[in-house]
């Protein structure tokens, strides 16, 4: 069964996704629970804040009313030390003005009344519902003017006087009651008027429009379904979005936690509790000190759950997004990282198939870029090595063939030469024989020289290095060409580094190489050309601490070598000259290779050719170590 090969991208995904997502999921899990606690704490804090704020608002309404009652009673008792009913006509305008100021002062005041000890009204000033314009008795001595009848009937007044009012700093607070005449709910706050001797002169009463208090409570919104409500000092609900005052009391609280909650409200505590009232709820509560009531702000627990579910959904979405982004990032990174590797793999396949020209573009300066550059250099090196190996194999094969051919040629040539000499010696009087004998001997000698080159090429002996001065060897070789340089008017220049150290070389073989290179350069330069010979230590040696090497460069300004011919110049018997044997450069190649060096050619048609011999710089000790 063929095994399934998993790609590096899949391996990266399998490795990286858990590393990315597991921490996110762990953080998300703890964030989820922490967020629930945070939301609960913030919601609880906001509930407490609303409870305190609205409790404070209602407390300020009643405290302000109590302060106004104190101010009115003090004003009347301080400046009117008399029986109110007897002197009302004299000072009625002042009292009316005073009542006007107070009733306009507060939007919650519905009516301010002044009554005598028997409960008869002396003054009644009320706020009209539209515009809140004050209305009062014009004649203070007329107690029951039909146009300005009291807001409350005598029956209402009796109910007021006997409705269980309680004393709070000598200020009495009635129950909440409903007026059939005006509609809606009201509550009275009253204070007795007493002279210095303690005799009761009457009573001042401020009626608060309790509908406005109910509206204030029912306007409270917390969350989607949260609301506020008021309970009095005995646990009865007196303001609620769903119940009328006193409709819901302590006897209807079925949940023990709800009863405990209401008890805490009754005793004036501030806090936060959960209970069951048509579903699980949580409420914050705060007391109203002026009336000993308590206000609560409640919200269904399910809204907390909804918030928690939103957080949970957000965490899941975050994890999914992280998974997607991580997958995308891994795919992108793996593509960027693996693209050069894939190119390297493809290039390796091409090279193994024999395509040595494959080169990968370098697109970065990181490690992958360095790897790509190294691969390209390795490819070039392998290509050069392969070319050298092919050339060496060619040379070896052709050398073996050449040795056999040359050996076979030499014996017949010697026989032919001996026969021609014999014929020339014994028929010297025949001019025709003499003429053709000379011609035959010339061609036989030329063929013998060609055979000698064959044999030299075929039997390239190993170098026999000795310590020589390379500059002297070059100068001696150049001296052999002085006559030819003059005849062809070729200008020869030298750039020989003077401090070249002595080198271990086979002088005869290196001289043969120099002769071959100079012959080619002279032929290429032609009449009036130029040849430049250079010998120097390779610059890269000093830069990279590489093994020391010496360069011998022979340059000419001739016609150059055509690009199509460059790859064949080291092949045996390849020559672009009519008289060439095509063995000079192959022989030179073999000699330099035997010395551990290389020959490189750089030629530009119409500009010239540069032949570079690269030799290792070895002294006598190095040579001895190598052997």
Image (cartoon, rainbow, N blue to C red):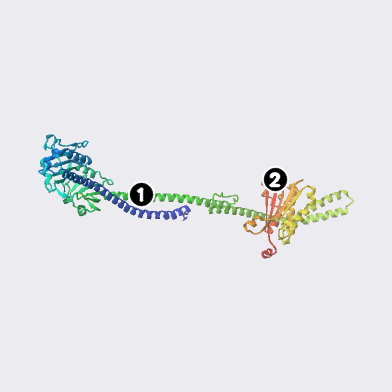
| Occupied quadrant, residue 269 | bottom left
Q: Return the residue nearer the eye: 441 or 486.
A: 486
Name the residue located 60 percent from the left edge and 51 percent from the top edge. Answer: 356
| Residue 564 rendering spot, x and y as whole percentages | 66, 46
In the visual, does 427 lie left or right of 388? right
Name the residue located 68 percent from the left edge and 61 percent from the top edge. Answer: 618
The answer to the question of whether label 2 and label 1 lie on touching residues, with beta carbons closer than 8 A, is no
Q: Which residue is mark 1?
A: 314
Dot 1 alpha-carbon crowd within 10 angstroms: few under 14, some 14 to 19, many 20 or more? some
In the visual, does 82 lie left or right of 20? left
How far apart, in angstroms, are the residues tagged by discs 2 and 1? 74 Å
- Residue at the top extreme of this rendering: 147
Q: Which residue is mark 2?
A: 607
Name the residue located 70 percent from the left edge and 48 percent from the top edge. Answer: 609
In the visual, does 572 lie left or right of 142? right
| Residue 520 rendering spot, x and y as whole percentages | 73, 50
Q: Earlier in the sequence, mark 2 or mark 1?
A: 1
| Residue 189 rendering spot, x and y as whole percentages | 17, 45
| Residue 51 rendering spot, x and y as whole percentages | 25, 49
Classify 609 as above or below 136: below
Q: Return the residue nearer the eye: 318 or 117.
A: 117
- Helix, strand or loop under label 2: loop
């Amino acid at each position: 069964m063929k095994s399934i090969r998993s790609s590096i991208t899949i391996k990266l995904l399998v490795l990286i996704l858990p590393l990315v997502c597991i921490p996110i999921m762990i953080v998300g899990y703890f964030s989820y629970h922490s967020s629930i606690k945070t939301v609960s704490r913030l919601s609880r804090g906001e509930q407490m804040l609303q409870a305190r704020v609205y409790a404070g608002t209602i407390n300020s309404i009643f405290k302000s009313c109590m302060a106004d009652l104190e101010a009115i009673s003090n004003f009347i008792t301080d400046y009117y030390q008399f029986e109110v009913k007897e002197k009302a006509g004299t000072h009625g305008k002042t009292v009316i003005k005073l009542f006007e100021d107070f009733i306009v002062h507060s939007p919650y005041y519905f009516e301010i009344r002044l009554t005598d000890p028997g409960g008869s009204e002396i003054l009644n000033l009320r706020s009209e519902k539209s515009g809140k314009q004050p209305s009062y008795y014009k004649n203070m001595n007329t107690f029951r003017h039909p146009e300005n009848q009291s807001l409350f009937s005598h029956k209402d007044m009796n109910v007021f006087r006997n409705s269980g009012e309680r004393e709070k700093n000598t200020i009495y607070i009635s129950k909440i009651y409903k007026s059939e005449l005006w509609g809606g709910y009201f509550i009275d706050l009253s204070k007795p008027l007493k002279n210095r001797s303690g005799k009761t002169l009457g009573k001042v009463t401020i009626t608060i429009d309790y509908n406005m208090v109910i509206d204030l409570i029912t306007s409270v919104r917390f969350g989607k379904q949260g609301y506020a409500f008021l309970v009095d000092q005995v646990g009865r609900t007196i303001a609620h979005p769903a119940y009328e005052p006193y409709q819901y009391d302590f006897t209807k609280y079925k949940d023990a936690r709800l009863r405990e909650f209401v008890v805490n409200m009754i005793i004036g505590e501030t806090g936060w509790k959960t209970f069951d009232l048509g579903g699980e709820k949580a409420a914050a509560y705060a007391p109203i000190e002026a009336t000993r009531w308590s206000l609560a702000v409640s919200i269904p627990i399910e809204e907390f759950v909804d918030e928690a579910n939103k957080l949970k959904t957000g965490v899941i979405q975050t994890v999914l997004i992280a998974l997607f982004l991580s997958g995308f990032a891994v795919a992108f990174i793996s593509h960027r990282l693996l693209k050069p590797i894939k190119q390297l793999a493809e290039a390796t396949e091409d090279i193994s198939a024999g395509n040595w020209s494959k080169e990968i573009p370098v697109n970065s300066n990181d490690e992958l870029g360095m790897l790509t550059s190294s691969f390209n250099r390795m490819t070039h090196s392998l290509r050069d090595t392969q070319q050298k190996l092919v050339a060496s194999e060619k040379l070896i094969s052709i050398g073996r063939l050449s040795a056999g051919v040359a050996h076979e040629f030499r014996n017949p040539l010697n026989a032919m030469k001996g026969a021609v000499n014999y014929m020339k010696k014994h028929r010297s009087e025949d001019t025709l024989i003499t003429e053709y004998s000379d011609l035959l001997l010339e061609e036989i000698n030329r063929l013998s020289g060609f055979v000698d080159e064959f044999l030299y090429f075929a039997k390239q002996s190993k170098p026999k290095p000795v310590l020589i001065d390379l500059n002297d060897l070059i100068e001696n070789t150049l001296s052999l060409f002085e006559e030819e340089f003059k005849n062809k008017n070729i200008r020869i220049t030298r750039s020989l580094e003077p401090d070249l150290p002595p080198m271990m070389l086979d002088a005869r073989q290196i001289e043969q190489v120099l002769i071959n290179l100079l012959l080619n350069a002279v032929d290429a330069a032609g009449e009036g050309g130029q040849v430049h010979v250079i010998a120097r230590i390779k610059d890269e040696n000093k830069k990279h601490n590489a093994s020391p090497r010496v360069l011998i460069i022979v340059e000419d300004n001739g016609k150059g070598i055509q690009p199509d011919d460059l790859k064949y110049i080291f092949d045996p018997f390849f020559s672009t000259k009519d008289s060439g044997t095509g063995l000079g450069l192959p022989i030179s190649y073999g000699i330099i290779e035997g010395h551990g060096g290389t020959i490189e050619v750089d030629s530009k048609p119409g500009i010239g050719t540069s032949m570079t011999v690269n030799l290792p710089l070895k002294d006598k000790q190095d040579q001895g170590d190598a052997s």
